[in-house]
Image (cartoon, grey):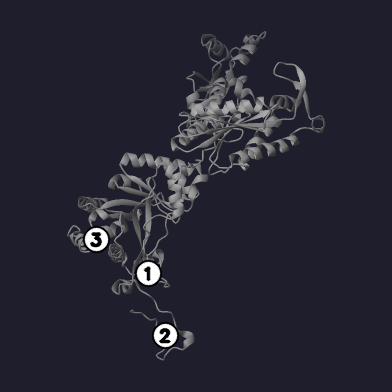
């Protein structure tokens, strides 16, 4: 090994205490063939078979340049970046050919290194080298790295086109890491796009990341590419990615980098991919207004200037019977006040108003502080109007502007209707009280369970004697009891296997894949019944319940609120639609309540 030593300025031999460590240079590693390759498997999600192996370079073991970050940083300092990459690729081809492995070899290269490897001879020398090693061009996939440094897209496209004609595959590496380019994806049309490990990490707990993967899958379909999820570290991440339809996966849970490449994925990964269990996909839990803004609520409405008189204003209201308010604008078209129809007409009807104020400007009795909102204001931001202490805004409506200029008016009635519709639609996806998935995600999950071909259990939970409790103690404590059901059920479900949804009111659905589902149901009922007693007052606890009206209006005694669960085993092929499963679970729930059982089990 050639070593470059750092010498002392003194001509004498340095003492033992002043010796400096030898500096290992990249040029030395290239010249003396000191680079080696590790191989990490990339697996097919649908079959669990190996698709190929990514080549990962290593410097001498135990040296400062053993790992890629330090190695390539040193290469840049020595001006050998391209030479180092080309050498790493050659070494990967040699090491891989020696192992006679099936599948593809994925080699990382920057645009500059790729152009150099193809070179003036259009890559003939590189292809000849592959032939000497017994490799076919179709065995190789080039992973394009350092996307931000691609300055000559034309040359890159030409190099890629030549390689493609020879059968070499192209991948885009680390997409989504902040350096990747959607334009580059569109320009080079890669066969594979490797998604940065940030999006895989803790995926089952982050709905936003799941939505990103869904969007990327749509992009991949548009561009004719397949996705590779990087950084898979546990069974839950792998299961979610498989269920999303991501084609390939890579990470330590599947297989660690090794000099002797593994012939198959690790047993735990194979077990996940072979299992019929489905993932519980995270749901976005914030209400959505579907992009509705103040402009969507706007009505075109005439406005008046500040010098408009009360008499002129009266004639306008008389002519425009549907007009509930009129905005007052200054000379620049900026709103300065709002006149409410009913209030104005009440004043007009008073004795002598016409004589005293008829020719006075309409701003005299107008509201000088109307609610003014920009046209792009989201509907959720406008919900504060509904709870505002100043209810004039709800009665009079509000002024809508763009860049400060008047556009039109919005009414309180329109706002209430739009907010209600948005909340109802949002509740179908996530219940606003418990933030648990609503009817649509419940149905989607049932559909996925049916398609999986595995047995599962659909459980329907409902409160007993909840209405009299809610009537007696009020909606606030009633909401507390409903949240208690959600909390207790969540604590006794396996978040990775069991799906908990809130249908609405005091009705909940649990879709179990856990083998001990019946024990979990019993625990949920027992724990809830224990904690629910804390929501009753001392007198009710002593009496064992409360006196309250029943559904027919008759006053009678009602025991303390408890929980019942009806569960139905759904065997493969027994039911075909989500609606049938929901109906069967509801039937089991009715049996549980009618027979006053904690848990009732039936077969579909």
Which numbered disc covers residue 59?
A: 1
Q: SS of the residue at dot 1?
A: loop
Badge nearest the viewer, 1 or 3: 1
Contact, mark 2 vs mark 1 (Cβ under 8 Å): no
Name the foreground residue: 408 vs 295. Answer: 295
Q: Position of residue 282 (x, y in %)?
A: 51, 41
Q: Secondary structure at mark 3?
A: helix
- Viewed as shown, does residue 505 lie left or right of 151? right
Q: Residue furthest bottom?
A: 12
Residue under label 2, please give it.
Answer: 8
Front: mark 2 or 1: 1
- Nearer the observer, 314 or 52: 52
Query: Residue at coordinates 37% horizontally, 75% vertically from top-left?
Result: 24
Mark 2, Cα crowd under 10 Å, few <14 / some 14-19 / many 20+, is: few
Residue 358 lies in what quarter of the image? top right
Marks 1 and 3, the one that precedes in the sequence = 1
* Farthest front residue in view: 603
Marked residue nearer the N-terminal end (3 or 2): 2
Say which element carries label 2: loop
Query: What residue appears at the point 42 percent right and 57 percent down from the top-left corner?
Result: 255
Dot label at residue 117: 3
């Amino acid at each position: 090994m050639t070593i470059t030593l750092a010498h002392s300025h003194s001509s004498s031999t340095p003492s033992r205490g002043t010796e400096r460590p030898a500096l290992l240079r990249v040029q030395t590693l290239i010249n003396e063939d000191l680079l080696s390759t590790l191989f990490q498997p990339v697996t097919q999600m649908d079959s669990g078979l190996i698709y190929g192996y990514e080549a990962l370079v290593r410097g001498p073991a135990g040296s400062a340049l053993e790992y890629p970050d330090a190695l390539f940083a040193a290469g840049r300092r020595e001006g050998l970046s391209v030479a180092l990459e080309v050498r790493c690729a050659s070494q990967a081809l040699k090491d891989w050919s020696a192992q006679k492995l099936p599948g593809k070899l994925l080699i990382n290269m920057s645009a500059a290194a790729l152009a150099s490897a193809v070179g003036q001879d259009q890559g003939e020398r590189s292809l000849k080298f592959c032939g000497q090693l017994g490799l076919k061009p179709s065995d190789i996939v080039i992973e394009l790295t350092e996307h931000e440094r691609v300055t000559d897209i034309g040359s890159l496209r030409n190099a890629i086109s030549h390689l493609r004609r020879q059968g070499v595959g192209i991948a885009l590496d680390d997409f989504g890491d902040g350096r990747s380019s959607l334009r580059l994806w569109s320009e080079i049309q890669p066969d594979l796009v490797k998604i940065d490990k940030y999006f895989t990490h803790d995926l089952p707990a982050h709905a936003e990341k799941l939505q990103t993967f869904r969007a990327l899958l749509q992009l991949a379909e548009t561009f004719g590419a397949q996705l590779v999820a990087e950084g898979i570290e546990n069974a839950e991440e792998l299961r979610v990615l498989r269920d999303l339809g991501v084609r390939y996966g890579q990470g330590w849970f599947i297989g660690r980098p090794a000099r002797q490449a593994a012939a198959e994925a690790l047993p735990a990964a194979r077990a996940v991919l072979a299992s019929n269990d489905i993932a519980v996909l995270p749901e976005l839990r914030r209400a959505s207004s579907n992009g509705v803004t103040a402009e969507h609520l706007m009505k075109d409405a005439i406005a008046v200037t500040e010098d408009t008189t009360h008499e002129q204003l009266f004639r306008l209201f008389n002519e425009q019977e549907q007009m509930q308010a009129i905005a007052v604008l200054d000379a620049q078209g900026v709103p300065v006040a709002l006149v409410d129809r009913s209030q104005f007409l009440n004043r007009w009807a008073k004795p002598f108003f016409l004589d005293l104020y008829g020719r006075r400007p309409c701003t005299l009795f107008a509201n000088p502080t109307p609610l003014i909102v920009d046209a792009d204001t989201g509907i959720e931001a406008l919900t504060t109007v509904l709870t505002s202490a100043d209810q004039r805004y709800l009665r009079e409506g509000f002024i809508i502007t763009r860049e400060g200029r008047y556009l039109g008016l919005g009414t309180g009635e329109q706002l209430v209707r739009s907010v209600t519709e948005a909340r109802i639609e949002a509740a179908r996806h996530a219940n606003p009280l418990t933030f648990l998935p609503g009817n649509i995600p419940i149905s989607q999950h049932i559909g996925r369970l049916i398609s999986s071909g595995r047995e599962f259990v659909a459980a329907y939970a409902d409160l007993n004697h909840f209405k009299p409790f809610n009537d007696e103690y009020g909606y606030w404590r009633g909401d507390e009891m409903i949240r208690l059901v959600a909390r207790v059920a969540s604590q006794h479900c396996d978040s990775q296997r069991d799906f908990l949804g809130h249908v609405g009111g005091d009705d909940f659905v649990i879709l179990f894949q856990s083998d001990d589902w019946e024990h979990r149901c019993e625990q949920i009922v027992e724990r809830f019944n224990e904690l629910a007693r804390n929501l009753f007052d001392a007198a009710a606890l002593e009496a064992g319940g409360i006196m309250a009206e029943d559904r027919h209006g008759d006053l009678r005694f009602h025991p303390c609120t408890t929980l019942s669960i009806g569960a139905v085993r759904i065997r493969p092929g027994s039911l075909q639609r989500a609606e049938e499963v929901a109906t069967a679970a509801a039937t089991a729930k009715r049996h549980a309540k009618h027979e006053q059982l904690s848990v009732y089990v039936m077969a579909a």
